[in-house]
Image: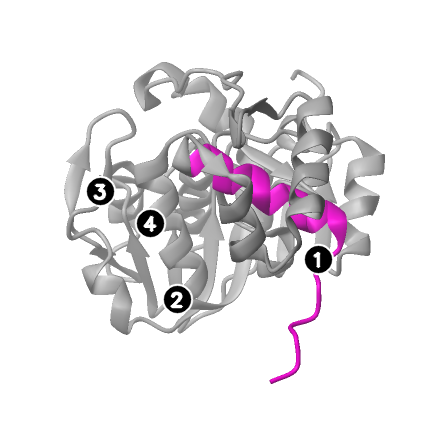
Amino acid sequence: MSPREPLPAEVRQGRIRSYVNEHEFVRVSDISERFGISEVTARADLSALEDRGYVRRVHGGAVPRQVHRAERPFDLTEDRPVADLAHLGAAGAAKVRPGDAVLIDVGTTTTALARALVARSELSEVSVFTNGLTIALELEAAFPRVTVVVTGGTLRPMQHSLVNPLGETILEGINASIAFIGCNGVDPIGGITNINLPEAEIKRRFVAAARKRVVLADGRKLGVVELVQVCAIDDVDELITDSRADPDVVDRIRDLGVEVTVVEAPQTQ
């Protein structure tokens, strides 16, 4: 068997960072085995991540550097911020066609997307699968043009979301037309990241269950890496962001083969 093709250093280091964050402590030997690199390279990668403030080296391995911001309950981000994200919601809703099966992740930006779908009165025979109770309630106004299926699972009150255990069961047999993923960070190296692990697990399943994967993120989230990786940048097809994004970060994401749509942010923001 021929050896697998090595990952570019930036991509590999982003995945190593997520691996460290998920496991709290990893040994150099663990990284070497998991990523198919020598222990010398693993140590060099950890040193590079430490220099950038992402991990802390300890004897034999590394631990996360806890610099992540606290998650805010959905009720503290709604309702004004959802309205402020209408431009992103409208851009996402424009991707949906009659007859589509759509996955919509939980979040404020995806709530703006749900509102934009309700406003598209010409849409019909659209099926939406969501793990967000807020999303489902927003879409109720579009019945019967839009059929809503709530994924089920365990209630997470912080974001009114449904997560594991049992949060993934209904998604195992789904092959959706398009998935819309919300997140807390988008970075060329760190990938698509989220503040909390339970919702990140469901986001991964959404990514796997759709033929097209679209990330919705306002420009202030670009260049940000949060606690846990949902997926690598090249695991998604399109990023919809706005004019607050750093143009250099946008260019680096495009260079990785991801379509990036930049819409104008409202002047009041």
The image quarter in which residue 169 lies: bottom left
Q: Looking at the picture, which amino acid does disc 1 mark?
A: Val
Residue 259 location in percent, x, y? 72, 57
Q: Which residue is mark 4?
A: 202
Quarter of the picture holding the N terminus: bottom right
* Residue 19 magenta: yes
Q: Is residue 221 above or below residue 253?
A: above
Q: Quote the CA–CA distance across marks 2 and 4.
A: 11 Å
State the residue at coordinates (70%, 70%): 5
Residue 50 location in percent, x, y? 67, 25
- Tell me if mark 3 has few (under 14), some (14-19) or many (20+) residues whose alpha carbon lies within 10 angstroms of its own: many
Residue sitting nearer the eye, 5 or 259: 5
Q: Which residue is mark 3?
A: 162
Q: Which residue is mark 1?
A: 258
Q: Quote the CA–CA distance across marks 4 and 1.
A: 22 Å
> Disc 1, disc 2: CB below 8 Å?
no
State the residue at coordinates (41%, 41%): 115
- Tell me if mark 4 has few (under 14), some (14-19) or many (20+) residues whose alpha carbon lies within 10 angstroms of its own: many
> Disc 4, disc 1: CB below 8 Å?
no
Q: Quote the CA–CA distance across marks 1 and 2.
A: 19 Å
Quarter of the picture holding the C terminus: top right
Res 173 seen here: yes
Q: Is residue 218 left or right of residue 175?
A: right
Q: Looking at the picture, which amino acid does disc 4 mark?
A: Ile
